Amino acid sequence: MGNLVCVVRIKFFRVSLLVFILISLAMTVICEKLPDRLFYYKKWMYRERKWENHGRIYDTYFGVKKWKTKLPDISDFMKWRFNKKHLAGSNKDYLSVFLMESCKSEFTHWMIILSTLFFVFWSNVTTMIIMFLLACVLNLPYIIIQRYNRPRLVRLLRKNIANEVELKTANV
């Protein structure tokens, strides 16, 4: 009887992992379909907090600079997606899109983490906690990367806009 219970728990856990993967994919697709206007970097959720110290806290405590380029980006698998791994331009339009994609990425990863609470309705508490921890381990690094990069992108965008204004003023 004990072996049967163990086999059932293992199968249930495998099903839970599959459900977690499917929910993560569904969240990604749903977030991708949301209007871009929801992902404006000046909105409350995406704004830099004073305690983040221009994103430096993420390097100080997590060493994000050392590992951020080693993690896969969704564009590694879906070539049509915006690549956030490396800065490929510095003009105002490109930086605005990069910032919007950064916010969308952060939101998506938060939604994946929160979606694990769904497990409370159909699994036991232990499975829900495991799925929640798994979601945190797999998604928090990406949230950290977005929170680390965004202040730098905003500074670069502001500098770009200031230079543009300065050029227009000089040409008047």
Image (cartoon, rainbow, N blue to C red):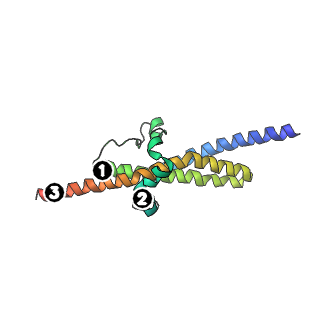
* Amino acid type at mark 1: Asp
Mark 3 nearby-residue class (10 Å; few <14, some 14–19, many ≥20):
few
User: Which is closer to the viewer, label 1 or label 2?
Assistant: 2
The secondary structure type at the circle numbered 1 is helix
Whole-percent x, y for residue 149 in the image: 41, 50
User: Which is closer to the viewer, label 3 or label 1?
Assistant: 3
* 3D distance between C-alphas at marks 3 and 2: 32 Å
What residue sits right under mark 1 in the picture?
A: 93
The secondary structure type at the circle numbered 2 is helix
Q: Is residue 124 visible?
A: yes
Quarter in which the N terminus is drawn? top right
Q: Is residue 104 visible?
A: no
* 3D distance between C-alphas at marks 3 and 1: 17 Å
Question: What residue appears at the point 50 percent right and 49 percent down from the top-left corner?
Answer: 62
| Marks 3,1: beta carbons within 8 A | no
In this picture, residue 113 sits left or right of residue 170: right
* Amino acid type at mark 2: Asn
Whole-percent x, y for residue 43 in the image: 42, 62
User: Which is closer to the viewer, label 3 or label 2?
Assistant: 2
In this picture, residue 122 sits left or right of residue 156: right
Numbered label attached to residue 168 = 3
Whole-percent x, y for residue 167 in the image: 16, 55
| Marks 1,2: beta carbons within 8 A | no
In the current view of this chain or complex, which residue is farthest to the right?
1
Quarter in which the C terminus is drawn? bottom left
Mark 1 nearby-residue class (10 Å; few <14, some 14–19, many ≥20):
few
What residue sits right under mark 2 in the picture?
A: 53
Name the foreground residue: 47 vs 58: 58
Judge whether 124 appears above or below 66 on screen: below
